[in-house]
Image (tube, grey):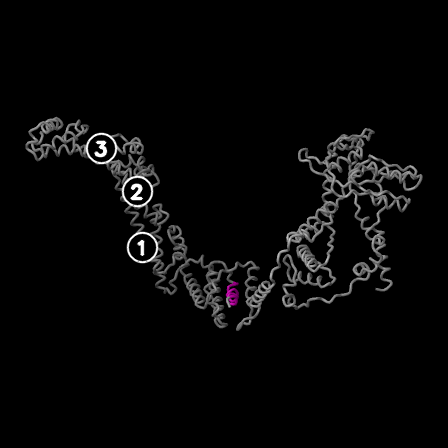
C-alpha cells in the first residue's frame, strides 16, 4: 500500500462521518416543536416523569391514554385542546391534550408507522421522551429550542377489551440523546452526563445532573416532567461513532485491505474459478460442497468463488435465489471456520436468511443484532442458549460416498439423454424436446403406445410418415371421422350394385323404424317391453282392476302369495264340506267325533258299544243327507272336518298380516282368496312394466284391446330389427364406432341412416379414409391414427408426432 492510500481512505471516512452527523435543528433530537399538534407525536400532560418511569420501566405495567381535550372544532378550524396545568397525576393513565376521536386516530397512526419502521428497517424508533432541555442557540436569541433528554423505548399494544392502545416499555436499553450531547459538546463545550441505569436510577436524578451541567447558560431550563411519545432515530449517529478512528485500535482502518478496496482503491480482478465449459461435477468433490439448502449450478459457482476468497457482486431480480445463495455462503463460511457479518437495508432480508439457517439446524451459529434482539437481555439469553446447546454432541456426518454414487448415476442418465443414438444420430432429449414443444404450442399430448416403434428403421419411419400423410389428406377430404355419415362401416369395397341395394335397405329400415316410432316408442328395447306389457294386460285375471291398487306394492312378497293360497285352499275345502254338512259342522271340534268313529273301523265289537254309537249319532245330526252305513265311510266324513280345521289354523296364522296388507279388500273368511291370489300372481309377472297400481288400473281402463295392440307393435319391432340387420350386414357396421351401441334410440338410428341415404356418394370418402388408416397401422402408425381420430392430436402435427414418438422409443 502506498503512502497516499491511507490518507485517501481517511478522507473518505471523514467525509462519510460528516454526512452522518445530523446536529442541526431539523433533527427532532435537537429540536422538538411540542406546540405542533399535527406532527406524528403525542404530548403527555399532567404527569410526573419519575412516576411514569416507575410504572412502565420498573413494574413493567401497561399505561392507558386519557383524552383531556374536545373533538369540537373552533370557527378557526382548530380542535380545542386541554390546557397544561400544574396538577400532576400518579395513576396508570397518561393524560393527553387531544379529544377522544383525535387521540384514537393519533395512536392508530403511531402504531402503524412504528410497526412499519421495525419491519422494514429492523429498528425501533418509537420512544417516550422524558424531560426536555429548553435552550437557545446563542445568548439573546428569541427562538427557544426544546430537546428530549431521556428516551425510553416503548411500544403500543392493542387492548382487546377496549379496542384502544396501551403503552408498554420495551426491554431495550435506555437511551440518552446522543445528537444533543454531540451538539452541546461541539458548540458550548458542555458534556451531558451519561445514563448509567441501575436499580436506583430515576429520571429525576439524571435531570438534576443535566440541570447542573447547563446551569452556566442563560435562560436554559430543564422541563423535568415534560413528556412526548414520538419517533426518534439514532442510527446515523451510531454509525458516526463507529467510524471514528479514535474508537478503534491504531491503524485498524488505514491498514485494512477490505476497507481500502471497498472505499478507496477497489479490488483487483480475480481469475474465475470455473471456465465457461467446465462441468461442476468434474471440478467439485461432494465431500467439499457445503450446502444446507438446494442450489443450482450458477448458485454453486457463486458459493465456491466466495469460499475461494474471490470478491464479487451477485445481481438478479426477485425470486432468482439470492437469499438461498447467501444462506449457503454463511453456512459454508461457518464450516470453514470463518466469521460472517450479514447486513441488509431491510429487516425482511435478514429475517429470510436467518429463518432459512434456523430451519437447516444452524440457529446456534447465528447471533441476531437487530430489531427486538438488539438489547442486552436478549443477547445474553441467546448466548446462554447457544452455550447450552454446544454441550450436546454433534450428529455424525453422512458418508459422501453415497452422494458420489448418486451424482454419478444422475450424470449417467444425463449422458443417455443427450448422447446421439445410431443410426439416427439424434439424442433422446431432442425427441422429447420436440414433443414438449408441441405441448407448449397448445397441442394436447397424445397417449401413444410405443411398443414396436424401436424396430422401425429410417425406411420404415419414412413409409409410416407417408402413410400418416395420406391418412391426414383423406381426413381433410372426409372431415372428422366421428362426424362422417358412414362412420363405423368396415365393408370398404362395395360395388355400385351393392350401393344401390344399400339405398333400398336404408329406406326400408327408415320406414320400419318410423312405424315403431309412430306408436310412441323411443327405442326398440322399450318397444319390446311394451309388447310384453300389452300381452300381460290381455290376460288380466278377473278383478284385476278392482284389486291392483291394493295388491301392487306387495305382489312380489312371497308371504302374500302363500297366505292367499292358504286362504283359497281353505275356502275351497269349506265349500266342499258344506255340500254334505250343516253350517254348524265347521265350527265343531272334530277330534272327539273322529276318535269315537275310529273304534268301529276294523272291529265288529267296537261298533256295538257306546263311543262308536254315540259318535255315529252326533255325525247324523251334522249331515244334510243320509249317513253312510260303513264305519270307514263315516270316519272319512270326520276326516274331512279334521282337514278343514287344519287349513283354518294355517289361515289364522296369516290373518293379521292379510288384514294389514289387503286393507279394505280384507273381509275375514268372506275374503275372495282365490281371486286375490290370481291377481297377485299376475301383478308379479307385470313387474317392471308399470310403475304402480294406479298405472295398472289406468292401463286396464284406457287400452280396450291390448292383445291386438301388442301383436301390431311386435310385428313392427320385428320388421325394424330385420331391416336394421340387413343394413348392418351389408356395411359390416361397427355399431359402437357409429355411436349406435347398446339401446340406441330410434331417433339416433334414423339420423344415422338418413345421413347415409342422403349422401351415398360420401361412401367413397369413408372407404379411402379407412383404408389409409389401415395402411398407416400396418406401418406402425396405428397409435398416431387413433390419436388423430380421437381428437387428441391435431392432424397437421400427426407426422411430426409420429417421428418424435419413434425417436423417443429408440
Pick the front one: 537 or 239:
239
| SS for dot 1 | helix
**3D distance between C-alphas at marks 1 and 2:** 27 Å
Which of these two is toward me, 507 or 383?
A: 383
Kindly report which numbered mark, 3 or 1, lies closer to the viewer in this rendering: 3
Position of 349 compared to 723: left or right? right
Which mark's residue is nearer the viewer, 3 or 2? 3
Magenta highlight on residue 803? yes
582 relative to 429, above or below: above
Mark 3 vs mark 2, CA separation in Å = 31 Å
Viewer-nearest residue: 635 or 759? 635
* The N terminus sits in image quarter: bottom right
Residue 648 tag number: 3
Q: Are marks 1 and 2 in contact (CB under 8 Å)?
A: no
> Is most of the magenta stretch helix, strand or loop?
helix
Q: Tell which residue pokes out farthest to the right in this image.
A: 140
- Does the magenta portion include 91? no
Which numbered disc, 3 or 1, marks the residue that appears first in the sequence? Answer: 3
Residue 722, label in figure: 1
- The residue tagged 2 is 686
Q: How many marks?
A: 3
Q: Distance between the residues labelled 3 and 1?
A: 56 Å
Label disc, if present, on residue 643 of the rendered structure = none
Depth check, mark 1 against mark 2: the one in front is: 2
Q: What's the magenta region?
A: 796-808
Asked whether residue 250 is in view, the answer is yes
Residue at horizontal 43 percent and vertical 67 percent from the top: 778
Please provide percent x and percent y for residue 662. 30, 33
Amino acid at each position: 500500500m502506498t503512502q497516499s492510500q491511507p490518507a485517501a481512505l481517511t478522507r473518505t471516512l471523514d467525509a462519510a462521518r460528516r454526512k452522518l452527523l445530523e446536529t442541526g435543528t431539523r433533527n427532532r433530537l435537537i429540536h422538538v416543536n411540542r406546540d405542533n399538534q399535527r406532527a406524528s407525536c403525542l404530548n403527555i400532560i399532567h404527569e410526573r416523569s419519575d412516576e411514569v418511569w416507575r410504572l412502565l420501566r420498573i413494574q413493567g405495567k401497561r399505561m392507558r391514554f386519557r383524552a383531556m381535550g374536545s373533538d369540537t372544532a373552533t370557527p378557526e378550524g382548530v380542535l380545542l385542546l386541554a390546557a397544561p396545568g400544574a396538577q400532576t397525576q400518579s395513576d396508570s393513565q397518561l393524560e393527553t391534550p387531544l379529544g377522544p376521536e383525535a387521540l384514537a386516530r393519533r395512536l392508530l397512526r403511531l402504531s402503524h408507522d412504528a410497526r412499519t419502521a421495525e419491519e422494514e428497517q429492523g429498528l425501533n424508533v418509537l420512544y417516550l421522551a422524558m424531560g426536555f432541555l429548553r435552550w437557545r442557540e446563542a445568548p439573546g436569541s428569541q427562538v427557544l429550542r426544546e430537546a428530549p433528554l431521556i428516551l425510553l423505548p416503548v411500544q403500543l399494544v392493542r387492548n382487546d377489551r377496549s379496542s384502544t392502545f396501551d403503552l408498554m416499555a420495551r426491554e431495550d436499553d435506555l437511551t440518552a440523546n446522543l445528537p444533543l450531547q454531540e451538539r452541546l459538546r461541539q458548540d458550548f463545550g458542555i458534556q451531558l452526563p451519561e445514563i448509567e441505569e441501575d436499580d436506583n436510577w430515576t429520571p429525576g436524578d439524571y435531570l438534576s445532573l443535566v440541570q447542573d451541567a447547563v446551569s452556566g447558560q442563560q435562560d436554559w431550563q430543564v422541563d423535568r416532567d415534560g413528556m412526548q411519545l414520538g419517533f426518534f432515530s439514532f442510527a446515523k449517529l451510531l454509525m458516526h461513532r463507529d467510524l471514528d478512528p479514535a474508537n478503534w485500535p491504531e491503524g485498524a482502518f488505514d491498514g485494512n485491505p477490505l476497507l481500502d478496496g471497498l472505499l478507496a482503491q477497489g479490488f483487483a480482478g480475480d481469475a474465475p474459478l470455473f471456465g465457461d465449459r467446465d462441468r461442476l461435477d468434474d471440478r467439485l468433490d461432494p465431500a467439499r460442497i457445503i450446502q444446507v439448502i438446494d442450489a443450482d449450478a450458477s448458485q454453486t459457482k457463486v458459493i465456491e468463488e466466495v469460499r475461494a476468497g474471490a470478491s464479487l457482486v451477485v445481481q438478479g431480480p426477485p425470486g432468482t435465489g439470492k437469499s438461498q445463495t447467501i444462506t449457503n455462503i454463511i453456512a459454508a463460511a461457518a464450516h470453514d471456520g470463518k466469521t460472517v457479518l450479514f447486513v441488509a437495508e431491510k429487516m425482511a432480508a435478514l429475517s429470510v436468511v436467518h429463518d432459512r439457517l434456523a430451519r437447516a439446524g444452524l440457529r446456534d451459529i447465528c447471533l441476531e443484532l437487530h430489531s427486538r434482539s438488539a438489547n442486552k437481555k436478549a443477547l445474553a439469553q441467546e448466548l446462554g442458549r447457544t452455550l447450552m446447546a454446544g454441550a450436546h454432541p454433534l450428529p455424525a456426518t453422512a458418508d459422501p460416498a453415497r452422494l458420489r454414487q448418486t451424482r454419478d448415476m444422475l450424470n449417467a442418465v444425463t449422458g443417455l439423454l443427450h448422447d446421439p443414438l445410431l443410426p439416427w444420430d439424434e439424442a433422446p432429449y431432442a425427441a422429447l424436446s420436440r414433443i414438449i414443444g408441441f405441448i407448449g404450442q397448445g397441442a394436447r399430448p397424445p397417449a401413444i403406445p410405443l411398443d414396436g416403434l424401436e424396430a422401425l428403421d429410417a425406411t420404415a419411419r419414412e413409409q409410416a410418415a407417408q402413410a400418416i400423410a395420406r391418412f391426414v389428406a383423406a381426413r381433410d377430404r372426409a372431415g372428422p371421422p366421428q362426424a362422417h355419415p358412414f362412420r363405423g362401416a368396415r365393408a370398404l369395397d362395395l360395388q355400385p350394385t351393392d350401393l344401390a341395394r344399400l339405398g333400398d335397405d336404408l329406406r326400408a329400415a327408415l320406414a320400419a323404424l318410423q312405424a315403431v316410432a309412430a306408436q310412441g316408442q323411443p327405442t326398440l328395447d322399450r318397444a319390446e317391453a311394451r309388447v310384453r306389457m300389452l300381452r300381460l294386460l290381455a290376460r288380466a285375471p278377473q278383478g284385476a282392476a278392482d284389486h291392483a291398487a291394493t295388491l301392487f306394492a306387495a305382489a312380489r312378497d312371497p308371504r302374500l302369495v302363500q297366505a292367499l293360497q292358504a286362504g283359497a285352499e281353505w275356502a275351497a275345502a269349506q265349500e266342499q264340506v258344506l255340500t254334505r254338512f250343516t253350517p254348524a259342522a265347521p265350527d265343531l271340534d272334530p277330534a272327539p267325533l273322529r276318535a269315537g268313529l275310529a273304534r268301529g273301523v276294523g272291529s265288529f265289537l267296537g261298533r256295538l258299544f257306546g263311543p262308536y254309537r254315540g259318535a255315529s249319532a252326533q255325525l247324523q245330526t251334522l249331515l244334510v243327507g243320509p249317513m253312510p252305513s260303513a264305519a270307514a265311510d263315516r270316519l272319512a266324513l270326520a276326516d274331512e272336518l279334521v282337514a278343514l280345521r287344519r287349513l283354518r289354523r294355517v289361515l289364522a296364522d296369516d290373518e293379521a298380516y292379510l288384514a294389514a296388507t289387503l286393507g279394505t279388500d280384507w273381509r275375514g273368511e268372506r275374503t275372495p282368496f282365490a281371486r286375490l291370489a290370481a291377481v297377485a300372481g299376475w301383478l308379479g309377472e307385470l313387474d317392471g312394466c308399470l310403475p304402480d297400481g294406479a298405472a295398472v288400473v289406468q292401463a286396464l281402463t284406457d287400452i280396450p284391446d291390448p292383445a291386438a295392440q301388442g301383436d301390431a307393435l311386435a310385428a313392427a319391432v320385428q320388421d325394424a330389427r330385420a331391416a336394421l340387420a340387413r343394413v348392418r350386414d351389408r356395411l359390416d357396421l361397427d355399431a359402437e364406432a357409429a355411436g349406435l351401441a347398446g339401446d340406441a334410440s330410434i331417433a339416433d338410428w334414423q339420423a344415422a341412416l338418413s345421413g347415409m341415404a342422403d349422401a351415398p356418394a360420401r361412401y367413397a370418402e369413408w372407404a379411402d379414409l379407412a383404408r389409409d388408416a389401415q395402411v398407416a397401422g400396418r406401418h406402425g402408425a396405428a397409435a398416431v391414427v387413433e390419436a388423430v381420430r380421437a381428437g387428441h392430436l391435431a392432424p397437421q402435427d400427426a407426422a411430426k408426432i409420429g417421428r418424435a414418438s419413434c425417436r423417443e422409443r429408440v
